[in-house]
Amino acid sequence: MSIHERLYATSATQEDMKLHPVIDVGGILLRLLLFEHYILKSTRLCEIPKMVELLGLGQTLVLLRSGAFEIYIDAVTTVETGRLTTLRSREVKGALPLGSYCFQTVSIPDRREYVSGCFRQWIDPMPFGVKSRQKLKHALLDVAREAPQDIGRTTITGLRKDLLAGGPLVTRAVSKITQEKIGRAIHIDDLRIQVEVIDDEDIAVETNLGRLLGADEQTVHDIVQRAFLNISGLNQRLAEMKEFNALSGFQTNDLPLFEEKVTFIVQGLDPDRKLERASRVFSVLNLPDFSGIGVEYKLDVDQFLKVRSSQECQEFRAWLPSIDQSSDAEIRERVSSLNARVAEAMNTKPGKVIRFLTTTGLGLVPGAGIVLGPAASAADTFVVDRLLKKSGIVTFVGKMYPALFEPLDK
């Protein structure tokens, strides 16, 4: 499966809210519609109660068992330990002075206990019987993904390479933090940052940031540390993308750093653009969206899975990039024009032949969905190849997608 069709992303719109995170269930469903496979980067399984609340337990189980959905349940992060003398290794080496750093990754020491804790926090309090909760737990374990092996080493190796190489990635990361932390924008051309190796773990940094800001040594140390941790997070996300062979969404604030590192990915493979395009089409055509599931509408997950696997949905996905330069009015016109062209073609002689073949069930050919006999004319073939394939877009937005949304019984 192409990396373009696999997505690895979170659904929590406020990841720092550990007790009451905001979960975008509609976003989960939209991602599943637009990508063949979705790996949810979970925050301790906090997304599951909201999914069950809006979809229902049975429908959630169908989704988990569909083969289209996996959940990454793990925790790996980068920390700075240069002055953490409670660590035996740092006690032996001694605390680093301000302006020097040691970056390391930490992970869950006992993953089984970690997952059990996630269950206790988010699954056990759910208002279901023991058997229902056990079914849900087993379904979650079946789709659970662990942290990629060696992800920590890969992350730190990438971080050190970036820091020693210097350049716009490092200066932009520091400039971004100065703006966030103290409200001062530093132009990257004025900023000087030089990273020197102390040993295979520790580094020292020389910078003119203190002079530019008029800031003390501790403030400069903290800004540089936060910037370098951001670069490490970027390297970890890229390593996860490689391991999962999946695109990954980035927060808007991360994109300048990501662009410095791999511009072509931001421009050509940004999964958020796919979501934005689809949401725009649905809005322009006054179609419902998944944010109303469980509030205004209910969803038949079996039917949803059939629609997302359909040829029409594939054609809709492939069509989305073509709308980037189109106005809202042009999008409406393009869809209605396709609809009109197909209707007109079906009233021509070859169109009537094709309609006869399809309505009498005389067979199919891959891609067109129709069999043409040996006497078929060039006009027949044109209608099939050029028009009826495009009709999948009309069928998707005009019939298949809206039919997913069944109003809730009041």
Image (spheres, rainbow, N blue to C red):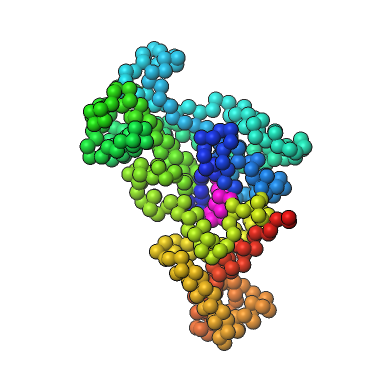
Q: Quadrant of residue 119?
A: top right
Q: Residue at x 54, y 82 (%)?
A: 344
Query: How many discs appear?
Result: 0
Is 12 one of the magenta-colored residues? no
Horizontal and vertical percent position of residue 226: 38, 31
Horizontal and vertical percent position of residue 293: 64, 52
Q: Main secondary structure of the magenta part?
A: helix
Residue nearer the viewer, 176 or 357: 176
Above or below residue 194? Residue 355 is below
Determine if residue 302 is in view. no
Q: Residue at x 47, y 46 (%)?
A: 248
Residue nearer the viewer, 259 or 363: 259
Does residue 36 appear to the left or right of 185 in the view shown? Answer: right
Q: Residue at x 57, y 81 (%)?
A: 346
Horizontal and vertical percent position of residue 90: 40, 16
| Residue stretch rendered in magenta on the structure | 26-39
Does residue 289 appear to the left or right of 252 in the view shown? Answer: right
Above or below residue 325? Residue 140 is above
Does residue 216 appear to the left or right of 149 in the view shown? Answer: left
Image quadrant containing the C terminus: bottom right
Horizontal and vertical percent position of residue 98: 32, 20
Determine if residue 129 is in view. yes
Residue nearer the viewer, 43 or 265: 43
Is 30 one of the magenta-colored residues? yes
Residue nearer the viewer, 186 or 304: 186
Q: Residue at x 34, y 32 (%)?
A: 182
- Residue found farthest to the bottom: 349
